[in-house]
Amino acid sequence: MAVVAIEMARTRKNEQFISVALATATCTLLGSGLPTPVDAQEEPSWNINTAAFYYGEDGGRVQDFSIKAIAERMFVDDRVLTLGLAIDALTGATPSGAIRLDVPQTLTQPSGNATKTVPAGEYPLDDTFRDIRVALTVNWQQPFGDTNLFNVGASLSKEYDYLHVGLNAKVARNFNKRNTTLSAGIAIARDQIDPEGGIPTPFSSMLDVGDLSNRLGTDSKDILDVVVGVSQVVSRNLVVQANYSYSYSDGYLNDPYRILSIGDSVSGDTIPRTPPPGVEGPSHEYIFESRPVERTKHSFYTQAKYYMNGKVLDASYRYMTDDWNIDSHTVNLRYRWPLGASKFLEPHLRLYSQNEAEFYRLSLVDGAALPAHASTDYRLGNFDAITLGAKYGWKTRSDNDMSIRVEWYQQSGSVPANLIIGNQAGRNNYPDLNALIVQFSYRFSR
Amino acid sequence: MSSRSPPRDISIRSLQQGWLGRFQAMGSPCELLCESRTRSAARQLTNLVAAEAWRVEDKFSRYLSGNVIDRINSAQGEPVLVDDETANLLDFADTLYELSNASFDITSGVMRQVWNFDGSDTLPSQEQVSRVLARVGWRKGRWVRPTLRLPADMEIDLGGLGKEYAVDSAVLILRGHTDTPCLVNFGGDLAVTGPPQQRAAWSVGVEGVAEGRADRMIELRAGALATSGDARRFLLKEGNRYSHILDPRTGWPVADAPNSVTVAADTCTQAGMISTLAMLRGADAEIFLDDQAEQYWCRR
Amino acid sequence: MKSTTIITATLLLTCSGCASLGVEPWERDVLAKDEMQLNADPVEAAIDDHIYFSKEASSGGRGFGGGGCGCN
């Protein structure tokens, strides 16, 4: 046995000798001296980018645990198939839109099956916000000739009360020795909303437990997005891009769970109400919100990436304006700072501000005529937001990329003076938001 | 073969990331990819490379009369004095004969007289094979540098070495002439002078079984790639695929040779020889390749 | 919309001036780096887009994709 093993070992050594002998013989043949060592690598077929992330607002509000993966399968000739999967587990509560009062409030849950009582002085939150969401995307990239690139894709997402289906396509063409790229894309989507208990009729009252007479079932909205853009290499170290986007939504644009308090015209306090005997129901007057059935948005976005001796500054600005009278500004700054050959630190600052929608209200007024539309959704309100954080990245032993990102997101808003009535003035009316974002990423190729 | 005087002109085409010079040599389409700044610079480099390819072809082709190969093959048993370059190649062939246990043999070319790899099922008889095998065997000749003496009915054919040698020679010439990154590709045997400037690496497609379509991409920054393979030349009889790699020791095709072997090595000559030696191992090709230091892609 | 006209005109003017800007093909070494790509981290971009779409009134701008959700 040992003899066989030695014999085999000697044969293997002889085999390896062939390479060496061949190298020597080739050197002699070519008479060129030692050649540069070969450097060849098979191009990976797959690039996979994964992330696990946590988003958590304080005050018992929304928490999201999520896993995301994007897998790119590369084919020869720069054709790429991209598959995306995202799974989110959402819990926590979100402001319902009712104002805070100095007395407790009781509201019927969105399902219509139970009530919830909110202590005095607290924001009535809707805590039935428990959901699992799954989203899938697929995209095919196909080059045409040397200068054109075509993308086509589809998206699908599902959660307990929501279904989204979409298609998108994009073309891009480069000019001027690939220094300029023009692109245009279009996306259409149909979203279906099927909330617990059914969609409440806009501006209908919040009813007692068990009464679903104001419910309409399901509804949907159609969305069209168009983007045109140009990217330009300015110099060896600077590349910029500018985009214009147009977005049109048509259909049910309300949040089916959001309500408005109906307040007294002088004190501003919500009008109390007594449910019929033997029945549970709201303690005050609330009605469901009503938004327009159309929305047109225009966005202008510009970004620059500037390389300064190993460090990269990424700055972008976006201006959005829509026909709900909302204007917003977003500034994003990232500074990537390499630490040695394989690590980096990237601080990030995001500044955002928006003004309220034309139909944004803090509450409605008892006795006054109903406006055409009204919503107390804080996300349509007047606020500033800031995100501050940093990402730290490193290369693993197998030369793959890992990173961890921690950020704080804070929204602080205010209600315009002309919307505040009576006692509402003494309270902090905007449900300010403080959230922690933590993301862990891993990117590898096969 | 169709290599009887194809036109010796070169064409230059502009690519997104450089220039492509093309010409015909040694029976194959030949290319030079270079990152020259101007078309005339690309043309100048392509001229250099084509000149070297045609020089090697003219000197070592077995189809041309009057060159050193012709003198050797028509010497009728007389000794032939050869120049340094030819002597280098014969020394190299001699080393390969030893390293391959006589399976790489430059005198085996005469076997093509009984083997016709046209995809049909016409196999020669054992008698035909034995007769031609009598005229094969490097050790039947006498090589003592600078003189080669072959028995009267034997011939040598440097076709198994010539292309890879020409690639390496062209690369050396380019390196001595310019800093421009270039890739020299003679019919799928290729080498680079260095990494490209405009992207991270040269992207080379390796042809899969489906003819003409690359199904794997290799990123090359330095060195060479060569492929041995029978993707196009074989005989099919009773379901057995007879590859065109003949074993000069038996006169028959190597059994269970892979469809193709691509090897990455420091020079094209090394890459070509490792892939050829692997093919000659037949069923043991992968075992042989695993024992070598070079990266390889083997398709069965 | 007036602002649309202005912005479109600006984009077009930028494009016409583009012919004089840029680099030669052999000067693209820095631009080829991963960290210099305009969309260097698509997963992080998708995560951020989703967070801010759910918590603010604006969305996208850079492009689109991924789809909607019931959170706005």
Image: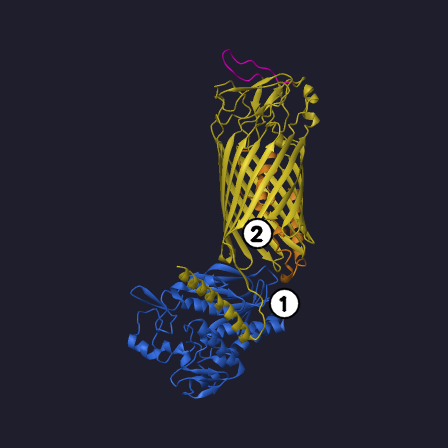
Chain colours: A yellow, B blue, C orange
Q: Splitting the image into 4 quarters, where does residue A405 fall?
A: top right
Q: State which quarter of the image contains the N terminus of chain A.
A: bottom left
Q: Splitting the image into 4 quarters, where does residue A429 fall?
A: top right
Check whether the beta carbons of the residues at disc 2 and disc 1 lie within 8 A of each other. Answer: no
Query: Residue C42: image x %, image y %?
Result: 57, 46
**Disc 2 secondary structure class:** loop
Q: Which residues are magenta?
A: A269-283
Query: Residue B91: image x %, image y %?
Result: 49, 78
Closer to us: B273 or A157? B273
| Disc 2 chain ID | A
Q: Residues within 10 Å of mark 1 (few under 14, many from 20)?
A: some
Which amino acid type corresponds to the residue marked 1 in the rendered image? Arg
Q: Nearer the viewer, mark 2 or mark 1?
A: 2
Closer to us: A164 or B119? B119
**Disc 1 secondary structure class:** loop
Residue A309 falls left or right of residue A128: right
Query: Residue B7: image x %, image y %?
Result: 49, 77
In the picture of the structure, the residue carrying the numbered disc 2 is A399
Closer to us: A426 or A270? A426
Q: Please say if B177 is above or below A316.
A: below
Q: Residue at coordinates 51% horizontally, 31% vertically from top-left?
A: A131
- Name the disc covering residue B37, or none: 1
Which amino acid type corresponds to the residue marked 2 in the rendered image? Asp
Q: CA distance from mark 2 to mark 1?
A: 34 Å
Q: Residue at coordinates 43% horizontally, 66% vertically from top-left?
A: B278
Q: Residues within 10 Å of mark 2 (few under 14, many from 20)?
A: few
Q: Please say if A29 is above or below A243.
A: below
